[in-house]
Image: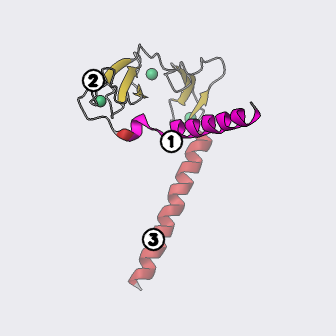
Amino acid sequence: MKKCLSVFLSILMLLSVCAVSVSAADECQHSYTGTYVAPTCVDDGYFLYVCSNCGDNYKVTENAPAALGHNFGEWYVIDNAECIYEGHEKRDCARCGASDIKTIPVLGHIDDNSNGKCDRCNEPMKSETTFAPFDWLMALFQAIIQFFKDIFA
Ligand SMILES: [Zn+2]
Ligand SMILES: [Zn+2]
Ligand SMILES: [Zn+2]
């Protein structure tokens, strides 16, 4: 019985809230004030009209500037690429502080003095880097060409 009563009361409350909100909207002689909201990097600008009596509002995007887009500065290195690690560069938007990151490719070991060690990081050069599968294929290909040259010569 008690439960029934509380359900009945909550329905009654719901109905009264509806009635109040409907009548408020009906009675309001809207008085809108427009405010210009400037565009940001990612959002378009707009005019926001708010009724000072009931708070009803709407946006008008016509004749307002579109989103500006980020104003990125120059790229700067945040960590350098190394023989086996990629590096990163970053640039920041001067307007909103958003940032953009791009990777710097791995440098790979170099051995210009041919001592079997990387000139940069001193790691031993691995044999597969000097005998890559592509080189192996090229060698095979050239051997085949030579073979036919020998036959038709
Ligand atoms: Zn109003
Ligand atoms: Zn920005
Ligand atoms: Zn290295």
**Which residue is rendered at x = 38% and y = 23% of the image?**
90
The answer to whether residue 97 is seen in the rendering is no
Q: Which disc, if any, is residue 133?
A: 1
Name the secondary structure under disc 2.
loop
The span from disc 3 to disc 1 (Cα, nearest Å) is 81 Å
Q: Earlier in the sequence, mark 2 or mark 1?
A: 2
- Label 1: element kind: helix
Between 50 and 63, the residue placed more toward the observer is 63
Which residue sits furthest left? 122
The residue at which mark 3 appears reads as 9
Please identify the dominant SS of the magenta region.
helix
* Amino acid identity at mark 2: Asp
- Which callout, 3 or 1, points at the residue further toward the start of the chain? 3
Drawn side of residue 93 relative to residue 35, left or right: left
Q: Quadrant of ligand 3?
A: top left
Which quadrant holds residue 146?
top right
Q: Between tags 2 and 3, which lies in front?
A: 2
**Which region shows up in magenta?**
128-152
- Residue 119 disc label: 2
Q: Is residue 113 magenta?
A: no
Mark 1: amino acid: Pro
Q: Position of residue 73 (x, y in %)?
A: 42, 14
Type of the residue with mark 3: Leu
SS at badge 3 = helix
